Image: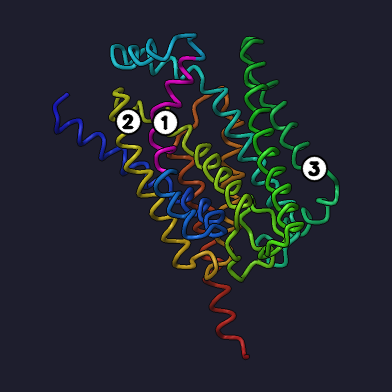
Amino acid sequence: MTAMDTVGRALLLAAVEVSLSFDNAVVNATVLRRLSAFWQRLFLTVGMLIAVVGMRLLFPLLVVAISARLSPVGVLHLATADPHAYDLRLASARPEISAFGGAFLLMVFLDFLFTERDLTWLRPLERLSARISRLDRLAPAIALGALLATALVGQHPESQVNSVLAAGLLGIIAHLLISGLSGLAEHGSAEDGVDRADGADPTDGADRKGSAAPAPLRGRDAFFAFCFLELMDASFSFDGVIGAFAFTSNLFVIAVGLGIGALAVRSLTVHLVRRGTLTDFVYLEHGAHYAIGLLGTLLLATAYGSLPQLLSGLLGLGVIGTSLASSVVRNRRLTRSPV
């Protein structure tokens, strides 16, 4: 492969990453807008290192090392000497990766859905979900049920079914742990007299009144929200890392191409926050969380098969586009209304 061909493939990967990740940018913005300028800079610097070096380079190596029971040096040699074999090893771990990411994203969506808020988009569904949210621990129960259905439907060896269940449980535990730590930090802040913008869970990224931009989180709340943001962003990128092998088998070209795309998406996220887009178009946050729920469901449903990245990207973009159009219609209606 020539140098020009290598550069072309990397740029193509970057373009695909950007075009299919607009929904990811909107989703990230729902959390990032709760963070101060300092944490937003970390999102573009330290967060980029996590996204590129961690998720696009080290994470695939770690997955193959665990599944193939190889040393890190052995996996790196496999990736450089026999990229096709490395790709097959990584693809074989798709069920576990999809189960973890799907369960985590589904929990994010369910936490949003089962929160009562003044501003509603899909009013009948959101009002119904607000009423039944009085049932305690409903979100984990639904996520566990979806995970169990995923494991039972797949016609695969028992060992793989067990690993899918374990990966999905880890996704649910990760969400519950970060939410719990955020709640603990919030309680500690209240005892210390630290001012909070409102009583909202920092991990949902939502101002529950639905219109005003929330004040930035501080201290431990901001740290846990940042961790939540990175884990959610990682869940979105799982399938893209595996799907990149359709363009090239060179691990480092994949890391560079997806890294350029990730930087563009993160820059777009910060732009959306600083322009106040989520405040101006109030249903975008709803659309972003419905896109999260859709992707989480698709990941779980296709844990034993291939999830076309184009399909998931277009569906997510369609949901967010619809929420944007609804926001525009609402803004025009309010403008025409007499004061």
Mark before the other along the chain sequence, 2 or 1: 1
- Residue designated by label 2: 254
Q: Residue at x 51, y 19 (%)?
A: 93
Mark sitting on residue 241: 1
> Are the residues flagged by discs 3 and 1 in contact, CB closer than 8 Å?
no
Classify 163 as above or below 31. Answer: above
Image position, residue 279 (x, y; %): 55, 68
- Label 1 SS: helix
Q: Residue at x 47, y 60 (%)?
A: 37
- Magenta span contains residue 63: yes
**Amino acid marked by disc 2:** Ile
Quadrant (top left, top right, bottom left, bottom right) of the C terminus: bottom right
Mark before the other along the chain sequence, 2 or 3: 3
Image position, residue 249 (x, y; %): 31, 22
- Residue designated by label 3: 138
In this rendering, position of residue 41 left or right of residue 219: left
Highlighted magenta segment, given as a residue range: 48-65
CA gap, disc 3 to disc 1? Answer: 32 Å
The secondary structure that dominates the magenta segment is helix
